[in-house]
Amino acid sequence: MRTVELLCSPGLEEAVRAAWVRLAAAGLPSLARNVHPTNRPHLTLASVDEFPPGAEQRLADLCDAALPLPVRLDRIEVLDGSAPLVWLLRPGPQLLALHAAVWDVLADAPGRRPWHLPGRWIPHLSLALRFRDADRRRARAVAGLDRPAGEFVTARSYDSETRTISELVPACPRPGG
């Protein structure tokens, strides 16, 4: 499987990682326990079995033109009742346009994951992969102390077969920097 993911600005990544740590310290499931070197807060735009020929460069070009993208986190939810604990995003028009453009590039990709398709996609940053809905109120109190804002500043692709990432877009320089 290959993904298209956006990574957070340092301040936003720090806020999400702090929520991971608070959840773990409270004895709740948390991605803080995932020590794989690719484990970072990220927004998945698409997931497919493999990229069609030429798609990786087209995706890189799209992301490069769109980044950095502003983002504000919203409420914490459990998807599907007993699944990932996530911090929902308030998607702006630029993010929605990028998401649609990514799927235009991947229209012929084999194994398109339906939960990332336009119309079904719920933009979020994951906090824990297996979570009981019954613990949602406690998780909100522990993890969701505020609703941080930041930017998505870089893009990558994860390859589940090799458990490696490839950089689609390097981190964007800050304005004036």
Image (cartoon, grey):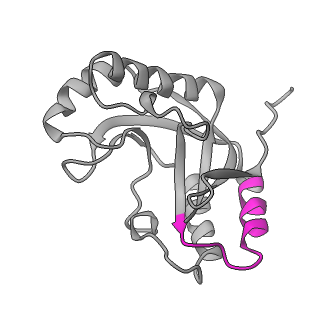
Residue 68 lies, in percent from the top left, at: 70, 42
For residue 127, above or below residue 54: above
The image quadrant that residue 46 belongs to is bottom right
Task: Tell me, yes or no, whether the highlighted magenta stretch contains residue 101.
Answer: no
Q: Which residue lies furthest to the bottom in this view?
A: 108
Residue 27 lies, in percent from the top left, at: 26, 21
| Residue closest to the eye, 163 or 9 | 163
Give the residue at x 45% y 63%: 116
Task: Tell me, yes or no, whether the highlighted magenta stretch contains residue 63.
Answer: yes
Decide if residue 99 is on the left or right side of residue 141: right
Give the residue at x 61% y 75%: 106
Residue 61 lies, in percent from the top left, at: 78, 61
For residue 15, above or below residue 78: above
| Residue closest to the eye, 59 or 35 | 35
For residue 51, above or below residue 28: below
Q: Give the range drawn in magenta.
A: 47-64
Decide if residue 148 is on the left or right side of residue 164: left
Give the residue at x 54% y 43%: 42
Q: Residue furthest right?
A: 177
Give the residue at x 62% y 67%: 102
| Residue closest to the eye, 114 or 172 | 114
Q: How many labels does the image show?
A: 0
The image quadrant that residue 30 belongs to is top left
The quadrant of the image that shows the N terminus is bottom right
Decide if residue 130 is on the left or right side of residue 177: left
The quadrant of the image that shows the C terminus is top right
For residue 40, above or below residue 140: below
Q: Residue furthest left?
A: 134
